[in-house]
Amino acid sequence: GLKLPPKVAPIQIVIIPIAQHKEGVLEEANKLFEEIKSNFRVHLDDRDQYSTGYKFNDWEMRGVPVRIELGPKDIENGKCVLARRDTGEKIDVELENVVSRLEGLLEEIQNNMFNICLERMKEKTSIASNMEEFKKNLETNQGFIKTMWCGSADCEEKIHDETGAKSICMPFVQENLGDKCVYCGKPASKMVIWGRQY
């Protein structure tokens, strides 16, 4: 399901009171909301017509990075539970340390999500020096392909016609993968990243 990085998530944290009908739970949840709302984009889900399980699922589908669970036993122990959307891990945290722990946790989630995407992009990027390799990589790896290109719009069009792949970008930081165009074999000085758009 959806997982949003904390830096772009409209709501970074959702507070879900557990057994909110019990005495003091909603009050403590509101107190926690007031304490953290100036530091984070936070929402308190105090809807009483839905079950806790429904709320958990609802906010997971919206990709909110952190869920705070706060119930009667947590309050009694001076703690709450932080649930990470990226890994599913649940962490017990002292209520007095919530703000500092959330700051670190959101940074951890941001970095973890970025590193996972970076690794996936590296795994799904191959290099081709001719059209035979290009077509093979496109079928077996279904990701991005780096090639050298002569700069001719005609070669670009023919690559698209034959493979369905389009030039995605010409990176600012160029790599020298060879000196010949992947399509025509003429001298090439530009490295281009190609891919299919579905």
Image (cartoon, rainbow, N blue to C red):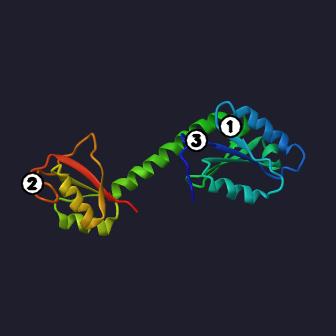
Q: How many marks?
A: 3
Q: CA distance from mark 2 to mark 3?
A: 51 Å
Which residue is denoted by mark 3 in the rendering? 105
Quarter of the image holding residue 53?
Answer: bottom right
Query: At numbered mark 1, what does the secondary structure look like: helix, strand or loop?
Result: helix
Mark 2 against mark 3, which lies toward the viewer? 2
Q: Is residue 137 visible?
A: no
Q: CA distance from mark 1 to mark 2?
A: 61 Å
Residues at discs 2 and 3 in contact (Cβ within 8 Å): no
Residues at discs 1 and 2 in contact (Cβ within 8 Å): no
Amino acid type at circle 1 is Val
- Please provide percent x and percent y for residue 113: 49, 49
- Please provide percent x and percent y for residue 96: 72, 34
Mark 1 against mark 2, which lies toward the viewer? 2
Q: Earlier in the sequence, mark 1 or mark 2?
A: 1
Q: Is residue 108 left or right of residue 150?
A: right
Amino acid type at circle 2 is Lys
The residue closer to the viewer here, 119 or 144, is 144
Which residue is denoted by mark 1 in the rendering? 98
Amino acid type at circle 3 is Leu
Mark 3 surroundings within 10 Å by alpha-carbon count, few (fewer than 14), some (14 through 19), many (20 or more) = some
Rendered residue at 71%/42% (across/down):
43
